[in-house]
Amino acid sequence: MPSRLAGLDLNLLLVLDALLREHSATRAAEALGVTQSAVSRSLSRLRDHLDDPLFVRQPHGLIPTARAQAVAAPLRQALEQLGSIVEPPEAFDPSTSRRRFRLSSADLAGGVIVPRLAARLMVEAPGVDVVVVAPRDSLFDDLQAGELDVSLGVFPTAPAAFRRQALFHDDFACLVRADHPTVGDRLPLATYLELSHVLVAPHGHARGFVDTTLAEQGQVRRIALVVPHFMTAPLVVLETDYVVTLPRRLALRFAALENLRVVEPPVEVVGFTMSQLWHERLQDDPGHAWLRRTLVAAMQPDENTPTATP
C-alpha cells in the first residue's frame, strides 16, 4: 500500500466525496449524519494530507479547486467499489439473471440429471446458461480455481475444502430389446449367464459391479462388448440380442423412449449415490445456492418420473 494512503483515515474520503457533491459543509454534514464542525475538522485534515486547499468559499457555496475537481470522479468510483466489498451480496433472481454456470458430469449423471435441470431452467430461469463438460483428472483443482461451479458424480470421499450433497440413490436393472427372443418378463440367472453382455467402462476395464457380485457366487458372464459411454450401450442393445445392466433410472429412461424393455437382474447388485460436489468458497454465494437447490428439486419424483419396471 502506498505510504501516503497508509497514513490516511479513509473516512476522510467519505467527507471529501460529500463536499464534492453538496458544495456545502452543512449539507455534507446532513448527508453523512455528523455535525458541521466534524466536517470542518475533516476538511482541515484533508488539506494537510493532500497539501491543497481543496475548496474555496464563495457566497453561493464551496467551489472545488482544480485538484479536488480532478479527483472527484475516481474518488466516487473507488468508494463504490469499496462499498461493494462490505455490502452483503445482492439477492439472486433466477427469472432475470443472465449468469452462466459450469458443471462437470459424465454421461450417466448427465443423462439423468441434466434433462430435468434444463426443464426447470426453461421455466424458472430462462436467461441462465449452463455449460456441461466432461470431468477431468484435475476435477478438484478445477472446482477450487473457479473453472467449475459444481460437479455431478459418485464421490465416496472428498477433500475437506469441498461440500457434497446427495441427489439420488440408484440400483441396477437390465435392458434388452422389446422383442428379445429368449428374455421374457423374468431373467433367470442361467439365462442371464448365457447372454452376451455389453459393459459400460469409461476407462476400458472389462469388469464391473455385476462381475464382482457374480464372482462371489462362483459365476462369470461373457462380456461381448465394452463401450465407454452409457448412452452407447442401449443403442447397441436395440440392434442386437445383447443385454446391458445399467443404473435403473437410466434404463427406465431409455425404455420409455425406444423399443427396449427393462427386466430385473437375477442377482442383487450394490447400488450407488449420485451427488453434487462444490468448493466451500461458493457455499454462501446466492446464485450458487440457487443452483444447488434447483439440482436437488430437479431430482425429486413427479408424475413424469419413471418409477416402476414396465
Image (tube, rainbow, N blue to C red):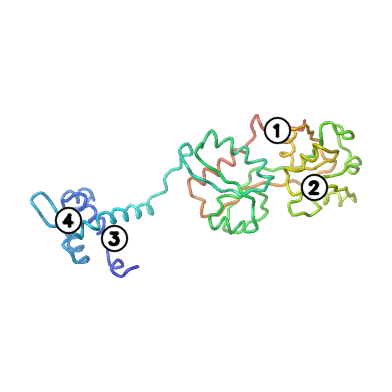
Callout 1 amino acid: Pro
Compare residues 38 and 60 and report the one nearer the observer. 60
Estimate the spatial distance between the alpha carbons at disc 4 and disc 2, rounded to whole Å: 78 Å
Return the residue at label 2: 199
Q: Secondary structure at mark 1?
A: loop
Return the residue at label 4: 64
Return the residue at label 1: 306
**How busy is the neighbourhood of tag 2: few (under 14 within 10 Å), some, or many (20 plus)?**
many
Q: Which mark is first along the chain, 2 or 3?
A: 3
Please state the horizontal and vertical placement of residue 31, each as a whole percent of the image.
22, 48
Give the residue at the far front of this rendering: 239
Looking at the image, residue 297 lies above or below residue 221: above
Q: Secondary structure at mark 3?
A: loop
Estimate the spatial distance between the alpha carbons at disc 3 and disc 1, rounded to whole Å: 61 Å
The quadrant in which residue 39 appears is bottom left
Return the residue at label 3: 10
Estimate the spatial distance between the alpha carbons at disc 1 and disc 4, rounded to whole Å: 72 Å
Callout 4 amino acid: Pro
Estimate the spatial distance between the alpha carbons at disc 3 and disc 2, rounded to whole Å: 66 Å
In-image side of 282 versus 31 (left or right)? right
Q: Which mark is first along the chain, 4 or 1?
A: 4
**How busy is the neighbourhood of tag 4: few (under 14 within 10 Å), some, or many (20 plus)?**
some
In-image side of 192 versus 147 (left or right)? right
**How busy is the neighbourhood of tag 1: few (under 14 within 10 Å), some, or many (20 plus)?**
some
Q: Secondary structure at mark 2?
A: strand
Q: Which mark is first along the chain, 2 or 4?
A: 4
